[in-house]
C-alpha cells in the first residue's frame, strides 16, 4: 500500500517522510485544491527528503480547461520540475465538454518524459469517468488517477472507485483514492475498493485543518494501519 501525503512547505514534507509517507504531493493553495508551487519550494523540498516528490502542475484554480498561454506556462513548469530532480508531476486537463483534453495532455506529456505522472481530481469533474479512464489507458506515461469516485469524499465514491480498480487491473494505470480520507474511514474505502494507493491531505494535519502543518504522528498511525490492512489481503 502506497501512502501519498500532501505537503505545502518544506517542514510538511520532512514530517510526512518521518511519519512513513511513501510519496509527497507538493502543492500550494491547498484551499483551492492545489496549484503549482514556486520553483524555490520545489527545489528545497526535493533536496530535503529522500522519498519521491510529485509536483502539482496547475497554473490557476479557475477551471481544468486551459488556454494556449496556460499550456505554455505548464510546459515551462514541467521543464523546471524535471530538472529539479522531482519524481513526477500531478496534472489534469479537461475540455469544456468534460472529456479528457487529449491534445493538451499530449503536449504536456511530451515535456514530461521520464517523470511519474498522476492525473488528478480533474478526473472527478469528467462527464463520464469510465470513458475518461479508457482514454487515459492509451497513455502509458500516466501511471495513476487520483479520484474520489466523483463524490465529495472517497467514502461516498467507493462504488465507482471499485469499478475503476477492476477496469484498470493488470494495466499500467493504478487508482489512488483521495479526498476526505481519515484514519477511521480509510479501512472501509480500501476494503471495498481494492485500491493500492491512498492520498491524504487534511486527514493527517494538525486538528484536521488544511492550513495547519502535517502531523507526523497521524502519518505514522495511517502507515501502521495500512500495514495491518495489507496483511489482511489474500496471499499475505
Image (spheres, grey):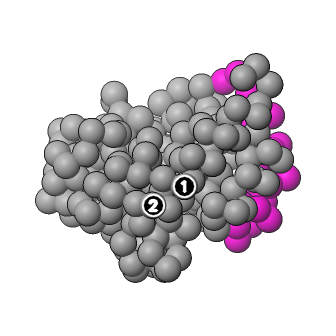
Which image quarter holds the C terminus? Answer: top right
**Would you say residue 62 is visible in this rendering?**
no
| Residue 159 highlighted magenta (yes or no) | yes
Q: Are marks 1 and 2 in contact (CB under 8 Å)?
A: yes
User: Residue 212: x percent and y percent?
Assistant: 39, 78
Q: Residue at x 40, y 60 (%)?
A: 216
What residue is disc 1 on?
221
Report how far apart the C-alphas of labels 1 and 2 lie in the structure. Answer: 6 Å
Q: Judging from the image, what secondary structure is the residue with disc 2 in?
A: helix
Of 2 and 207, which appears nearest the observer? Answer: 207
What residue is disc 2 on?
217
User: Residue 81: x percent and y percent?
Assistant: 24, 46
Q: Residue at x 63, y 64 (%)?
A: 182
Which residues make up the magenta segment? 149-171
Q: Residue at x 21, y 37 (%)?
A: 85
In the picture, measured across the screen, residue 41 lies left or right of residue 209, that is left
Which image quarter holds the N terminus? Answer: top right
Amino acid at each position: 500500500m502506497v501512502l501519498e501525503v500532501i505537503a505545502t512547505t518544506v517542514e510538511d514534507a520532512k514530517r510526512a517522510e518521518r511519519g512513513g509517507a511513501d510519496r509527497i504531493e507538493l502543492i500550494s493553495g491547498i484551499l483551492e485544491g492545489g496549484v503549482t508551487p514556486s520553483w524555490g519550494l520545489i527545489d528545497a523540498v526535493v533536496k530535503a527528503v529522500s522519498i519521491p516528490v510529485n509536483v502539482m502542475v496547475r497554473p490557476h484554480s479557475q477551471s481544468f480547461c486551459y488556454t494556449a498561454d496556460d499550456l505554455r506556462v505548464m510546459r515551462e513548469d514541467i521543464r523546471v520540475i524535471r530538472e529539479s530532480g522531482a519524481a513526477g508531476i500531478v496534472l489534469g486537463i479537461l475540455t469544456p465538454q468534460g472529456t479528457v483534453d487529449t491534445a493538451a495532455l499530449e503536449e504536456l506529456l511530451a515535456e514530461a518524459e521520464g517523470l511519474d505522472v498522476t492525473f488528478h481530481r480533474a478526473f472527478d469533474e469528467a462527464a463520464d469517468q469510465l470513458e475518461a479512464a479508457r482514454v487515459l489507458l492509451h497513455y502509458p506515461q500516466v501511471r495513476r488517477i487520483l479520484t474520489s469516485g466523483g463524490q465529495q469524499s472517497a467514502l461516498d465514491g467507493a462504488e465507482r472507485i471499485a469499478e475503476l480498480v477492476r477496469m484498470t487491473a493488470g494495466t499500467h494505470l493504478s487508482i489512488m483514492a483521495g479526498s476526505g480520507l481519515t484514519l477511521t474511514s480509510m479501512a472501509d474505502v480500501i476494503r471495498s475498493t481494492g485500491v493500492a494507493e491512498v492520498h491524504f491531505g487534511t486527514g493527517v494535519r494538525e486538528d484536521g485543518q488544511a492550513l495547519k502543518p502535517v502531523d507526523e504522528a497521524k502519518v505514522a498511525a495511517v502507515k501502521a494501519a495500512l500495514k495491518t490492512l495489507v496483511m489482511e489481503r489474500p496471499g499475505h
